[in-house]
Image (tube, rainbow, N blue to C red):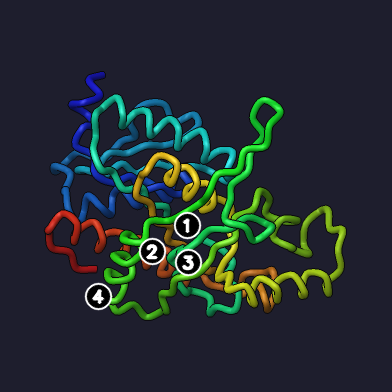
Amino acid sequence: MDLKKEFGHIRFVIFGGSNDRMKIVANSLAKSFWPVPLGQELVPIGSTTRYVLYRVGCVICVSHQMGMASVSILLNEITKLLAYAEAKDVVYLRLGTSGGIGLEPGTVVITQEAVNGYLEPYYELVSMGRLIKMKSAMSDDVIAKLMDAAKQLQLKYPVVTGKTMSVDTFYEGQARLDGAICEYTEQDKSNFITKLHQHNVANIEMEALLFGAFCNKLNIKVGVICVALLDRIKGDQVTFTAEDYLAWVDNTLNICKAFIAKELGIPFSA
């Protein structure tokens, strides 16, 4: 494969958790900006064993599955691919879901700063017996442009910036009470969630910290956009309808599309 021919023009990479969701994202981009010829359809490029990757216009849409371990592999592989293709000034954007802290379900959070479970803006890993701490930082200009895009769309639900706590596990790391293992009390959980709120943490998920650390290390522009599916202050269980969910995740995608359109100087209407 001629990587420069196939990927040298890429300007944006959109990352998301599930294979099905990224197929929807890719088709939505095609419908809005780069229509697929009649009788044809978008198909993944390469193997779909671990990830699913689509190319639409100057955008790559790729699934990263769950958690920072999986994301780490993908970030390395995508970044190497784009380096071999000699793509320049590529912006990385993650679209996802999260648990909100003191937020109305459906609120979109654009990550201003990602923190770990200690509420520190560092991603930590052990390499050859040594602890490495990588500073996690989002791109201020991307954050500002994403917020501008959101304002232009006049969405029904709020869009805010704030701190995002990224952890390695869905249950214990997020102080959930409904896991198979739970070694703390409901009061412990309540105290911790209150602490997060007091430290201006807006949401909890499992990937933003690494996106910020990896991209900061390599000077790649990055933004993370997640919808809050519930308010963790009020509980651990979601209560939304299927229609709610689709509308909420579409809001994150429309913000992303409006941002891309503005960067490319092309029209877009949600």
Please give the residue where the numbered disc 3 appears in the rendered image: 227
Cα separation between marks 4 and 1? 21 Å
Please give the residue where the numbered disc 1 appears in the rendered image: 96
> Looking at the image, is mark 4 or mark 1 earlier in the sequence?
1
Residue 26: x and y in percent read 31, 47
Identify the residue shown where x is 33% and y is 70%. 147
Identify the residue shown where x is 59% and y is 62%. 204
> Looking at the image, is mark 3 or mark 2 earlier in the sequence?
3
Amino acid type, mark 3: Val
| 3 and 1 marks in contact (CB < 8 Å) | yes
> Looking at the image, is mark 1 or mark 2 earlier in the sequence?
1
Cα separation between marks 3 and 2? 7 Å
Q: Residues within 10 Å of mark 4 (few under 14, many from 20)?
A: few
Residue 185: x and y in percent read 86, 68
> Looking at the image, is mark 4 or mark 3 earlier in the sequence?
4
Please give the residue where the numbered disc 2 appears in the rendered image: 252
| 1 and 2 marks in contact (CB < 8 Å) | yes
